[in-house]
Image: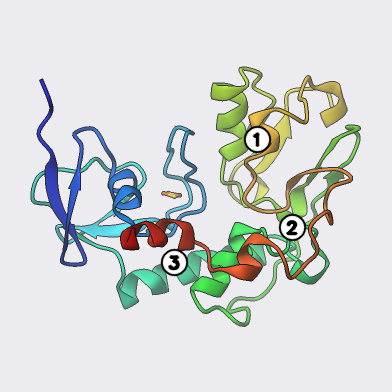
Amino acid sequence: MEQKAITFTIDGVEIKGSPGQTIMQAADEAGVYIPRLCYLKDLTPHGSCRICTVMVNGRSQAACTQPITEGMVVENNTDALDEHRRNIVDMLFVEGNHYCMFCEKSGNCELQAMAYRLGICAPKYPYLFPQSNVDASHPDILIDRNRCILCGRCVIASRDVDGKNVFEFVGRGPEKRIAVNAEAKLSDTDIDVTDKAAQVCPVGAIIKKRVGFAVPIGERLYDKEPIGSDIESKKNK
Ligand code: FES
């Protein structure tokens, strides 16, 4: 038996979704972009970055994990929520060492693109300049922990898609960092450059070697259109 569609609103616009969908999934299908950094289609949502926070019937919820219900009233595109998102992005920038002008992910980086979309032009908080390290031991992949935003995509992709559990979080608070399931180095793990975990990093923390500048800066994904444009373009089809 066909399941009845669920009708709800986002910013006053009626959206129809299917039972079991999250707000994010239904919004994506309807061409409504909700900002996100840790969520990636095809990976289990885990609600860690909170960029996707929306108001649901007046209460804040993570759109990537909150299921839709009949008649729910969702606010997404508001000044208050964008300010909340800007604060998170601002903190992510100063908690790491992000030198966009020298980073080979520039133009394809979701953090950088999110900052542009949200109108961030200058740092709001003092830089923390954490001591982080680079693991370039693997022949095909490297980890630059200076750029890691602890989104957890690599952890989930390696666990659920690759079945390898190469990555995990260790430490707490400011000491939290991404680690590998080996004595010391990435080269001691069984990660392969074709693994999903090597493809999903939103920033330049896990990158493939020797392809960083295959597409010149200025011609990359977010050099050409703001992040979220692919979803918003569905609305007009
Ligand atoms: Fe929902 Fe990160 S995208 S918490």
Residue at image point 39% right, 71% down: 82
Q: Please, is residue 51 above or below residue 26 in the view?
A: below
Residue at image point 40% right, 74% down: 83
Residue type at tag 3: Arg
User: Which residue is under mark 1?
Assistant: 170
Residue at image point 62% right, 69% down: 224
Q: Is residue 185 visible?
A: no
**Along the viewing direction, whichever of 4 and 57 lies nearer the viewer:** 4
Tell me the mark number nearer the camera, choosing from 1 and 2. Answer: 2
User: Which residue is under mark 2?
Assistant: 105
User: Left of 215 or right of it: where is 17?
Assistant: left
Q: Secondary structure at mark 2?
A: loop
Residue 188's image quarter? top right
User: Which residue is under mark 3?
Assistant: 85
Q: Earlier in the sequence, mark 2 or mark 3?
A: 3
Q: Earlier in the sequence, mark 3 or mark 1?
A: 3
Q: Secondary structure at mark 3?
A: helix
Q: Residues within 10 Å of mark 3 (few under 14, many from 20)?
A: many
State the image coordinates of residue 108 (x, y, percent, origin top left).
Answer: 67, 58
Residue at image point 47% right, 63% down: 229
